[in-house]
Image (cartoon, rainbow, N blue to C red):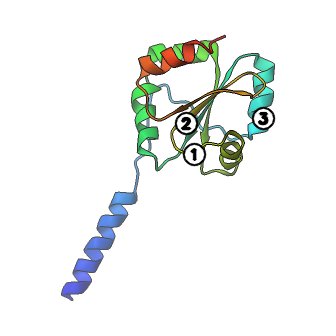
Amino acid sequence: MKYTLVFLSLVLFFIGCTVKAPVKVKNEIALYEGSIDDILQEGQLKQKPILIDFWASWCAPCIRMERETYSDHVLDSFIKKNFNMYKLDADSFNGLEAVGKYGVESFPTLIVADKNGNELEKIVGFYLPSYLQNKLRKHAR
């Protein structure tokens, strides 16, 4: 009986550790459901550089980027004015296809591409809003 209680306590503990609360951010960019080809077609129509944020629900730095970086109003306005941004779930079918195309090896990774999808820069890891905006400024339209 004693071992059963210990076992059940451990099971409940580990279940509690794996349940994640959804990330809620005012300026959250929704996950994109289309394929990488859809993104590239849209990029050509809108004539702006493309930002692809490779994200995973289990990635702590990705969640931190969502909460601390993308929620910044100045950065949000800058991105909306100068880029077409897409957030891809790296664990989805379409995300896996794009991960392969751009050689993404860790998360978060932000790919800056021209309107045709040619990679201009790969930004890997967590960045504060002002630093990310400075890195993106050279690619703004």
Quarter holding the C terminus is: top right
Residue named by callout 2: 109
Q: Which numbered disc flags the more N-terminal residue, 3 or 2?
A: 3
Q: Which residue is mark 3?
A: 38
Disc 3 residue crowd, few under 14, some 14–19, many 20+, Cα 10 Å: few
Query: What is the distance, in whole Å, between disc 1 and disc 3 at their CAs?
Result: 22 Å
Q: In the image, what residue occupies the spot 64% across and 18% down? A: 83
| Distance between the alpha carbons at the discs numbered 2 and 1 | 8 Å
Structural distance between the alpha carbons of marks 3 and 2: 20 Å
The correct choice, above or below, for 127 with respect to 109 in the image is above
- Residue 88 picture quarter: top right
Q: Are marks 2 and 1 in contact (CB under 8 Å)?
A: yes
Query: Regarding mark 1 in the picture, which secondary structure is present there?
Result: loop
Q: Earlier in the sequence, mark 1 or mark 3?
A: 3
Choose mark 1 or mark 3, whichever is in front.
Answer: 1
SS class of the residue under badge 3? helix
| Callout 1 touching callout 3 (CB < 8 Å) | no
The location of residue 81, given as percent across then percent down, is 61, 12
Numbered badge on residue 105: 1
Look at label 2 and name its amino acid: Thr
Q: Amino acid at mark 3?
A: Asp
Give the crowd class for mark 1: few <14, some 14-19, many >=20 residues within 10 Å: few
